[in-house]
Image: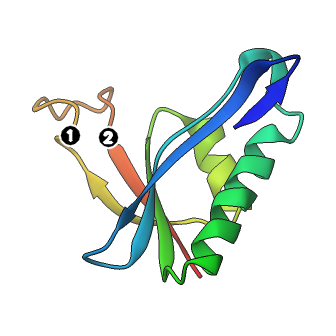
Amino acid sequence: MEYIGGKIIALAISEPQTWNNTLMIWHLQVNEKYIRKGYGRLLINKVSEIAQERGFRAITLETQNTNVPALHFYMQCGYQLEGIDVSLYSNNHSQKEEIALYMRKKI
């Protein structure tokens, strides 16, 4: 978490996945007033540092095909697309539906 004036401005929630020795980022969010000021990268780098210290082999996260800024951000941080789930959000497979994209950064 990152704070300014006692208020949370950025947050990352992750969980170890012991079955495959990875760290899963469940949530990464930056207050919209602080977007593009380096706080997202600061958090993602901290998660990476923790993963390395604890001996995880990779970090995994999920985002959506509709969140293009997040896709670009994660790719700039070294994450690669490793999987998709076309029915995580809906059973309707129209081209306008959200599709879950799983990204991973190997350590």
Q: Could you say which quadrant of the image residue 11 lies in?
A: top right
Q: Could you say which quadrant of the image residue 40 lies in?
A: top right
Label 2, on which residue?
Answer: 99
| Picture layout, residue 50 above or below residue 41 | below
Amino acid type of the residue that numbered disc 2 sits on in the rendered structure: Ile
Task: List x then y, in percent, for residue 28.
Answer: 58, 39
Which is nearer the eye, 5 or 98? 5
Residue at figure coordinates x 89%, y 34% from the top left = 37
Most extreme residue toward the front, as rendered? 6
Q: Residues within 10 Å of mark 1 (few under 14, many from 20)?
A: few
Alpha carbons under labels 2 and 1: distance apart: 7 Å
Q: Pointers 2 and 1 in contact (CB under 8 A)?
A: yes
Q: Which type of secondary structure does the marked residue at label 2 adopt?
A: loop
Camera-near label (2 vs 1) is 1
Q: Could you say which quadrant of the image residue 86 lies in?
A: top left
Task: List x then y, in percent, for residue 22.
Answer: 42, 72
Label 1, on which residue?
Answer: 88
| Picture layout, residue 83 above or below residue 27 | below
Report the number of discs: 2
Q: Which type of secondary structure does the marked residue at label 1 adopt?
A: loop
Say whether disc 2 or disc 1 marks the residue closer to the N-terminus. 1
